[in-house]
Each structure stands twice: as structure tokens, then as C-alpha cells.
Image: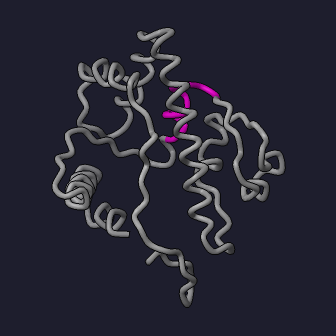
Amino acid sequence: SYLALSYAYGTNTKQSTLYTKDAVSRLLHQIPITYYMTLSLDDLSLIQDVTGPIEVEVKDDQLAAANPEWTKGSIVTVDSSNGEEFIRYRDTKVAGSNAIRMERQKEYLNTYLNALKTLINSDFDKALDRVSDVADRVYTNVELTEISDILDMVIDYTFDNIYQLPGEVVQGSFRTQFN
């Protein structure tokens, strides 16, 4: 995709991040991107450790191939040991499986956000320490002094309006395509 390609053109993390920031801004009609963070897949466990384990409802049967306990309707514990698999897994042999994965990711994000809000409301200093530890270990332009303000904003934030670009999933010669 255009955004992933923008990151790949950078020769280091800083340049790649700035290319991606600019690409996202252009995609959103030049909306300025003030804050950014780049993390690797290895850093997902750091993000998960901020809230600790969370309970997420599985909305599809696609995950059962990755873990037989992850069947539709089950409530599963997602933690730093299995978070990446829960978020990323999809059956690439099934056309449109990415749409199913994206719905699961929305469910995860909403559950994670609620857990983060609970942590912030119950122990703000603990939340601040944990998020500051993550910020120290990833590439970001967020200053440690700004994290407190960002956590205050998180309290009122929702993922209710996650939009997907219009288009359709079609089977191409070699793989599924989104047109």
C-alpha cells in the first residue's frame, strides 16, 4: 500500500517515520500530523504491558486455526505473549480475510482503550510511568512532559468512527486485491 511503501523509502527510522507522517497527512487532505510514534512488531508487547492482560470477545472463527481456544463467541485473555498473534492472524487462503481481521482489530482497540481508561482513572501515576517507559523505548516526537496531557485526552477518546476506504475485495491473479 501507499503508506507502507512510504515507510520503506526511508533509509532510517527517523526518515521513514517522517515520510509516513507526510503520506498520512496527504491522504487526509493535508491535515497536519502533530505527534507520531514508530514501533516494531517486537514493541507490541510493550504496548500490551501498559494495561496488562485484557479480555476480548472473539467475533469470528478465523482465529481457531491459530489457537483452538479462540473460537467465535469465546472470551479470551490477550497479553504480551499472544497479542501479536491475536491482532495479526488471518487466513490468507480466504478471500476477504483481512476485513475479518480488521473487525477483530477494532474490537481489540476498543477493549484496550477501555482498559487504558480504567488504569488512568484508577492510578494515573502508574499509567503515566508505564506509557513513559514505552515512549523511552520507541521512536516518537512526543516529549515525556506531554504524555500527561495525552493521557488526559485519552479519557474522552473513542474508536467509534473508524472508517474504511470505499472499495471491494476481488481475487487477483496471485492474491486478493482491494479495488
Expressed as whole percent of the image width and height from the top left, the position of residue 136 reads 35, 29
Residue 133 placement (x, y as % from top left): 41, 24
The image quadrant where one finds the N terminus is bottom left
- What secondary structure is the stretch in magenta mostly built from? helix
Along the viewing direction, whichever of 86 and 29 lies nearer the viewer: 29
Name which residue lies at 19% across and 58% down: 29
Vertically, is 127 above or below 46?
A: above
Q: Is residue 30 above or below residue 56?
A: below
Q: Is residue 52 magenta?
A: yes
* Residue at the (64%, 50%) spot, across then down: 85
For the view shown, which residue lies furthest in the right direction? 68
Q: Position of residue 24 (x, y in %)?
A: 26, 56
Residues 65 and 156: in front is: 156
Figure quadrant of residue 153 = top left
Residue under the point 48% across and 21% down: 117
Taking depth in this image into account, of 67 and 137 the one nearest to the observer is: 67
* Position in image of residue 120 (x %, y %): 45, 16
- Within the magenta stretch, is there residue 39? no
Q: How many marks?
A: 0
Region rendered in magenta: 44-53
Q: Is residue 173 above or below residue 141?
A: below
Q: Quadrant of residue 93?
A: bottom right
63 on left or right of 98: right
Q: Is residue 113 above or below residue 8?
A: above
Residue lying at 66% horizontally and 38% vertically, measured from the top left:
81
Q: Is residue 136 left or right of residue 109?
A: left
